[in-house]
Each structure stands twice: as structure tokens, then as C-alpha cells.
Image (cartoon, helix red, strand yellow):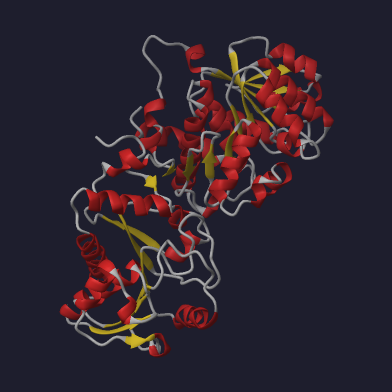
Amino acid sequence: MPAPGHRSALLATQEMYRADQLAIAGGVPGITLMEAAGAACASAILERCRTGRAVVLCGPGNNGGDGFVVARLLAEAGWSVKLALLGDLNRLRGDAALAAERWRGDVASFDTAFSGDADIIVDAIFGAGLTRPVEGDLAALVESINASGIPVCAVDLPTGIDGDTGQALGAAIVASYTVTFFRKKPGHVLYPGRGHCGETLVADIGIPAAVLDDITPGYVENDPENWLHHMTGPVAQGHKYHRGHAVVVSGGPASTGAARLGARAALRSGAGLVTVATPPEALAVNAAHLTAIMLAPFDTAAGLGRLLEDRRLNVVLIGPAAGVGGETRANVRAVLESGAACVLDADALTSFAPCPSELFDAIMSGPHRSVVMTPHEGEFSRLFFESGTASGKIERAIGAAKASGATIILKGPDTVVACADERAAVNTNAPATLATAGSGDVLGGIVAGLLAQGMPAFDAACAAVWLHGETGNVVGRGLIAEDLPEALPDILKGLSL
């Protein structure tokens, strides 16, 4: 059995180079890997169209070598193939030179590479290792390809996309589908790279999975294989307190719905008990809407602290519609001092925008407990100035985790979960329909419900983000936040807990 995370590992560019080197050192010739890569691309093209006209654009490195293999195999399958090389054929080296020798057709220059007359364009110019912007004549070629409407098969990664960050370096190819090898890279799952890749296909080219034991990658695509072993279901001799007691802090009487959404999600995700801690003036409003979820009034931060002296209350979600300002800051400090696990969302984050170090110090100097923050990009930028300047979303999230002492859920269409030990997971299952009012409150509640049951913070955050995405997929179009907790039981049942 592969180690947890091996199947869904994301390899940074240098880690993929290392995987190639380890495979070669283990006895797999480099040209064999290149032939397998080219064959995987050719097969993907032939599955979509048996014959046609291909333009294969090859760069000066190994990505271009893959392109030579694709061109040869398509020609052998009866395709009309035009191959163009960026650079001098005589300057190709190593396996790329060997692949070029096996190509018996003409080699055109990039000046005449693309006339708009093709059924498929194969982008084998630059793969994940691109380090400089695509500019000048090459940028003009990229833009003309994108404007042509002709399908593009990208080899490894679309030209112009950074393999480590998914950022576009100047002009970037928009592919119909991308064939990559062994494992995905961060650039395949982070936007805008994910959008440029189209469908991403991962091909086995003969690199042994055992090389990952040496590489020990820290990033994964979020998948149940990585955290399911930390998730437990009800046990026959257990009772509700075995499954934890989550507390969700409510806002004032006109701002109670967000807390109830979070509370419902915490209960549906498996917490044994859930209580909404409510200001006295909001007690009647909350009571009119809650049944299985309990209520506990509190009037000040000191009152919230006294409530949390009951150690059975083992996790607190605070922030959804809590109000921005000093009162919320005081309530957050009371929660952090209690020793309960904590999920900080929305107003709990924005309230500390003028003084982020105050929040970070409270997290790191308090008792040992799990703390998870769930910022969207706006909230993130208000709290994490230095981390916000990093180039990649994973790097920014890890920097924030180190600065704050919390596990970070940096939300978006490519949500990243990160912790201070430099582990990170990129989520890929969330539909666009989750962009609706209250959706984030439900996510915070799922995190709280899983923490209540004893999941480690990073794993609970990853599981919650994945479950949140699946609820969106189950509900589909017309989704509103109230639908999401109700979709959880069937999804949890499918996980065979």
C-alpha cells in the first residue's frame, strides 16, 4: 500500500526533476521515460480523433523532446504532422537529441510554425520548469494560438504557466487538455494554471512510486486518502460527549443566522452536542429557530470565559456575523485562553486587522490547543501583510501558518490548507455554486464539528474543505447555504466511517 498522500502528491518542479533522476538511477533509461511521455500524449490525442492534421511545437529542452516523440507517433498513425522547433536542432542535448534523431520528418522554424490550419496543436514548448516570462514573438504566437479556437494538447503544463505556483509568466497557452507525468504539480491545481490546463490527465511513464519515499513531498491534492484514517464514526459503547461538544458564538439579534448555519453544520458533521452561545438580547431570536442545538446566554467576554470553564465544551467557532471591533477581540481572547480548540472566521479575523500581532501572540502564548483560521483573500490580506507578498498561494498560506501559529484555510476556488510544518493541501472538488451567502459559515461549522470529535487540526481542515465541496456538488444549481449541512449525512455515509 502506498503511504497516505503518495497517490495524491503534488510535486514541485524540483521534486519532479528528482523523481526523474531517481528513476534513471534505479535503471530506467531517460529516453524510455521520454518515449512513454510522448506515447501518453499521442494516445490522448488519438482517443479524441483517429486522424487529422497536427502542429507540434517543440521547445529546446526535454519538453520539446517529448514533442518529437508525439509527432513521430502521430505520423505513424496516419496523421499529417508539421513540427516546429524553437531554437537550433543541433543544440539539442541528451534524450531530447535522441528523440529528435528518431523523427524522420521536416523541422520547421517557429517563424512558420502556425498558420491556423490544424486539427490539434501540441504545445511542447516549455513545461513546468519555465522561469522567465513569455514575451515578444513567442508571446504573439501564444496569443494567436489562443485566439484560433483550435484544440491544444499541452505536454506536462501549458507554456507560460509556472509549475510551482500556477501563475502565468507573461503570455500563457490555454489548453483543451494537459497530459502530465507521474504526479500533478501545484501549477495544475492552482488558478490561473488550473484554468489554462483544461482537463488534466496524469500518465504513468514508468517512474516507481517508491521514489516518493525519498522525496517526501509536503503538498497534496486534497483527497480522503490523506485524512480518512483520522476520522471516526460513532461507536457502540460511546455517548454524545465522546463525540465532542461544539460552541458557536452568535452575533446580535439582527445577525444570528450565520452562527446557526455554523452550528447546524457542526452537528451534521458529527459533533455529539452543539450549543449556540448568544448575547441575551439575541436569545429569543435564536430560540425561535433551534431545536436539537442548545442555547447558552453570555453577556461579556468574561461571561463567555466562564461558560467555557466546562471542559466538555471542547471547540468554539467564533466570527460568523459576530461584529467587528473590540468586543469581538475580547471574546476571541477569552476563547483562546479557555484551552478549547478554536475556529476563527470572518469578523473574528477582521477585528484584528489593526493589530494582527495581538491575535498571533494570543494563539502562540496560550494553552496547547488546535486553532484553525478560515480567511478568504480579503481577510487574509488584512492580517498577513508579509505572507501576502509571496508569489504562490501555497507559499502565502504556509507563511501565514508560521506567523500565526494556526492552521490556515485560505479560501477560494483553489482553497489551500496549510500548517506551520509546511504541509499543504490544495482542494479541487469545490463547485462555483458554493459562492453564496453563508457558505463560509457552514465550512467553519464543519471544521468545528470535526475538531470536536478529536481530529488533528490540519486533517480536520482538509476534511472539512473536501466535505464542503462535495455538499456543493450534491446539491448543484440553486444551492443556498441552508442546503449544505443537510447534504452531509449521505456524503459521510459514502466514506464508510
Q: Can residue 441 be seen in this view?
A: no
Q: Where is residue 195 in the image (x, y as percent from the top left)?
A: 48, 63
Q: How many marks do you count on the picture?
A: 0
Q: Residue at 56% across / 47% down in the picture? A: 395
Q: Residue furthest right?
A: 326
Q: Where is residue 475 in the image (x, y as percent from the top left)?
A: 48, 46
Instruction: Report the front residue among 191 and 282.
Output: 191
The quadrant the C terminus occupies is: top left
Q: Residue at 24% across / 53% down in the picture? A: 24
Instruction: Report the front residue among 444 and 146.
Output: 146
Indicate left or right for 496 with 76 as reference.
Answer: right
Q: Position of residue 83 (x, y in %)?
A: 30, 83
Indicate left or right for 124 with 337 as reference.
Answer: left
Instruction: Report the front residue among 471 and 203.
Output: 203
Q: Residue at 45% across / 54% down in the picture? A: 189
Q: Residue at 38% across / 76% down in the picture? A: 151
Placement of 489 over or under 417, stated as above or below: above
Q: Can residue 451 be seen in this view?
A: yes
The quadrant the N terminus occupies is: top left
Q: Where is residue 331 in the image (x, y as percent from the top left)?
A: 76, 24
Which image quadrant is residue 225 in?
top left
Indicate left or right for 12 with 259 as reference.
Answer: left
Instruction: Report the front residue among 378 and 394.
Output: 394
